[in-house]
Image (tube, rainbow, N blue to C red):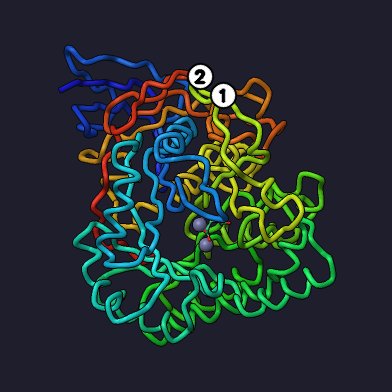
């Protein structure tokens, strides 16, 4: 059992910042304190560096079949990119296939287990509500799954009716499961899409115009109302519209068990990016909104209305006809070019799992929009608590997994210019933050005591990531 002593970092947790050494024994943190000694231990001098709990990304989509193609990171390439960005745990979504829920979960294990390079868990998508699904929802915690996702959009594919969502939430509450909601108005979207196509409006920005912010706002309130009516906790995923934050605040002020997540693109980009010639790069659902929405989301984070920042990482190539080199192999996967003539055919989703921490550190913490402790809370500790992983994950405590990021707060890079760090490892041909200056990046990343990223060096391997059996989470 390897013993590692990390000397003199500044420890940053969700609630405190202090100087201490960290002793790792095997996969766990054994001790934390001043002037620790451990004869025979490997000593790492971390003076001038910060030590953070490994990032927990609560929202990713690896190897997800969609739009006649597949998201271009699988559970190895996506996990590797995550690790370079300081993330040691990622949760993704098992698709609801025909047959038993347990078969859907087994099918997702078949995609993930042999490839996983960081620790991982699954949420369960519930995209069909029938007597079999109703009977099987209580079995999910026995499979290590304590959260499920429902959709109020994607009519005819993923959407459930309001009454069905109501019944799912009642069952979820009875089994200690958290309901996650994709909040948009599927009926309105379908009408607006048909009208846009009939009028010959086919460019990427029409993806945003046909998915109005008010639909997200009222669907969020609908979800909150269902939480009130069922008493079930609710987590609104990928919050994108300022009005959603207002609705969430309304529910929380009334003591309802409702929480929210946003994602970095909704903090930085607007529909204007979708008007660019390469606007397809920003096509995801829900879409980019306005600068006022960006601002309200930032405010929602700082006032505590929103609890987490995930990525909704779901990358596609911008031009999947042109191969890129990935670990020495030429790889090309059909992507956004599928919709070059029609916005409805652009695969929905953005890369981001490796970008989240460096971008938020630079443009959140360094820009004075959040403290370093809030940064840790939003990107690691809160997701771990909400999704039943704390204090094994999201914490630097004796007994926690030794998932530790040694963060260099002074390291400065320009994204996309020979950048071999963070998001540059996504298996796709573009990055949303190309050319942005980033100050502050992971220097070393430990997964359960094993060094998996050392500067620009990848020391990890497929299959080292463990599936996480999760408990019921907390309502924050
Ligand atoms: O465009 C997106 N976000 N694709 C992933 C699926 C989802 O709804 O989160
Ligand atoms: Zn969604
Ligand atoms: Zn998603």
Within-10-Å neighbours for mark 2: few <14, some 14–19, many 20+: few
Q: Is residue 422 visible?
A: yes
175 lies left or right of 386: left
Q: Position of residue 271 (x, y in %)?
A: 76, 57
Q: Is residue 249 visible?
A: no
In the image, 190 versus 146, the foreground residue is: 190
75 lies left or right of 402: right
Find disc 2 in the rendering and name its residue: 328
Q: Name above or below for residue 69 compared with residue 320.
A: below
Tag 1 secondary structure = strand
Q: Name above or below for residue 139 compared with residue 357.
A: below
In the image, 253 versus 129, the foreground residue is: 129
Find disc 1 in the rendering and name its residue: 325
Q: Name above or below for residue 417 compared with residue 239.
A: above
Q: Residue at x 69, y 45 (%)?
A: 337
Real-space CA distance between mark 2 and mark 1, rounded to the nearest whole angstrom: 6 Å
Q: Position of residue 236 (x, y in %)?
A: 49, 67
**Cβ–Cβ under 8 Å for marks 2 and 1:** yes
Q: Name above or below for residue 193 compared with residue 207.
A: below
Q: Position of residue 360 (x, y in %)?
A: 58, 42
Q: Quadrant of the C terminus?
A: bottom left
In the image, 339 versus 205, the foreground residue is: 339
Quarter of the view holding residue 283: bottom right
């Amino acid at each position: 059992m390897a013993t590692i002593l990390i000397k003199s970092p500044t420890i940053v947790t969700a609630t405190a910042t202090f100087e201490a050494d960290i002793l790792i024994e095997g996969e766990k943190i054994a001790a934390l304190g001043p002037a620790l000694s451990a004869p025979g231990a490997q000593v790492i001098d971390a003076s001038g560096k910060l030590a953070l709990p490994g990032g927990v990304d609560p929202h990713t989509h690896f190897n997800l079949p969609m739009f006649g193609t597949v998201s271009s990171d699988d559970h190895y390439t996506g996990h590797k990119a995550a690790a370079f960005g300081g993330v040691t745990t990622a949760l993704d979504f098992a698709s609801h296939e025909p047959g038993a829920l347990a078969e859907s979960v087994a099918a997702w294990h078949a995609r993930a287990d042999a490839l996983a390079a960081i620790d991982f868990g699954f949420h369960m998508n519930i995209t069909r509500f029938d007597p079999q699904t109703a009977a099987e929802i209580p079995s999910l915690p026995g499979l290590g799954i304590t959260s499920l996702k429902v959709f109020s959009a994607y009519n005819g594919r993923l959407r459930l009716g309001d009454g069905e969502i109501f019944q799912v939430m009642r069952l979820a509450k009875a089994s200690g499961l958290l309901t996650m909601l994709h909040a948009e108005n599927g009926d309105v979207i379908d009408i607006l899409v048909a009208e846009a196509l009939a009028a010959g409006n086919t460019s990427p920005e029409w993806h945003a115009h046909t998915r109005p912010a008010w639909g997200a706002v009222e669907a969020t309130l609908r979800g909150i109302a269902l939480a009130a009516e069922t008493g079930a906790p609710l987590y609104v995923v990928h919050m994108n519209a300022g009005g959603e934050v207002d609705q969430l605040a309304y529910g929380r002020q009334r003591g309802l068990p409702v929480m929210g997540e946003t994602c970095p693109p909704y903090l930085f980009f607007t529909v204007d990016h979708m008007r660019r010639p390469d606007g397809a790069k920003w096509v995801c659902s829900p879409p980019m909104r306005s600068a006022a929405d960006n601002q309200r989301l930032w405010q929602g984070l700082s006032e505590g209305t929103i609890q987490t920042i995930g990525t909704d990482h779901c990358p596609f190539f911008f031009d999947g006809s042109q191969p890129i080199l990935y670990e020495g192999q030429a790889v090309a996967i059909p992507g956004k070019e599928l919709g070059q003539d029609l916005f409805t055919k652009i695969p929905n989703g953005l890369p981001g799992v490796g970008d989240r921490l460096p971008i938020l550190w630079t443009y959140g913490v360094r820009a004075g929009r959040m403290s370093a402790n809030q940064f840790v809370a939003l990107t690691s500790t809160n997701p771990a608590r909400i999704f039943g992983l704390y204090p094994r994950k999201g914490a630097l405590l004796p007994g926690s997994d030794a998932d530790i990021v040694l963060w260099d707060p002074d390291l400065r890079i320009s994204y996309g210019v020979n950048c071999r760090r963070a998001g540059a490892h996504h298996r796709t041909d573009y990055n949303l933050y190309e050319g942005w200056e980033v100050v502050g990046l992971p220097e070393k990343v430990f997964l359960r005591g094993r060094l998996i990223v050392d500067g620009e060096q990848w020391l990890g391997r497929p299959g080292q990531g463990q599936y996480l059996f999760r408990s019921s989470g907390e309502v924050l």
